[in-house]
Amino acid sequence: CCPVYLGGSASPYGVGTNISKRTCDQLRCTACDFHVSHFNDYIWDQSCDYLFFRNNMPELSKLRAKMIKKKGARAYACQCSWRSIDELTDLQTDQQLRWVCGKH
């Protein structure tokens, strides 16, 4: 993917390019070396913190405690970072995230 896009649940998955703006479903974090999970139609509760994800990733049953249903959104998380996204977003606009395409 180049550029790498994040997006809400209405954004299709696939290889992202400038012409074909698709959200990457093969994200990997270079900080914690963890696969980035994504959940359609959910956002993260504002009380989420680093320790919550560090202790509960990737167990969906534990993560659900801080997931809020929101149609059209997508919740992303690895062990050290998390985001709730509503619309197509270029990953480069968020300098704090260390996520890259893990290759398709």
Image (cartoon, rainbow, N blue to C red):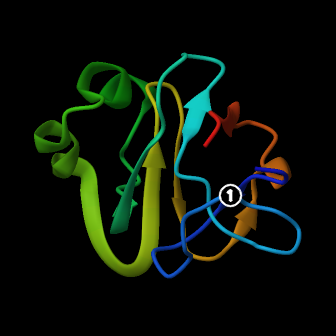
Where residue 80 appears, as percent x and y from the top left, is 51, 26
> Who is closer to the viewer here, 63 or 5?
5
Q: Residue at x 63, y 77 (%)?
A: 87
Relative placement, left or right, of 15 versus 66 is right
> Who is closer to the viewer here, 98 or 19?
19
Residue farthest toward the right in the current orientation of the protein: 18
Residue farthest toward the front in the current orientation of the protein: 104
Residue farthest toward the left in the current orientation of the protein: 61
Where residue 77 appears, as percent x and y from the top left, is 45, 41
Image position of 94 with respect to 51: above or below:
below
Query: Label 1 neighbourhood size at 10 Å, few (<14), some (14-19), many (20+)?
Result: many
Image position of 61 with respect to 69: above or below:
above
Secondary structure under tag 1 reads loop
Image position of 45 with respect to 55: above or below:
below
Q: Residue at x 54, y 43 (%)?
A: 26
Question: Where's the C terminus, which quadrant?
Answer: top right
Q: Residue at x 36, y 21 (%)?
A: 54
Residue bearing the label numbered 1: 15
> Who is closer to the viewer here, 6 or 44?
6
Q: Residue at x 57, y 31 (%)?
A: 28
Residue farthest toward the top in the current orientation of the protein: 32
Where residue 44 appears, as percent x and y from the top left, is 38, 55
- Location of residue 101 (image quadrant): top right
The amino acid sitting under disc 1 is Val
Count of numbered labels shown in the rendering: 1
Where residue 18 appears, as percent x and y from the top left, is 88, 68
- Location of residue 49 (image quadrant): top left
Image position of 20 with respect to 23: above or below:
below
Relative placement, left or right, of 103 versus 93 is left
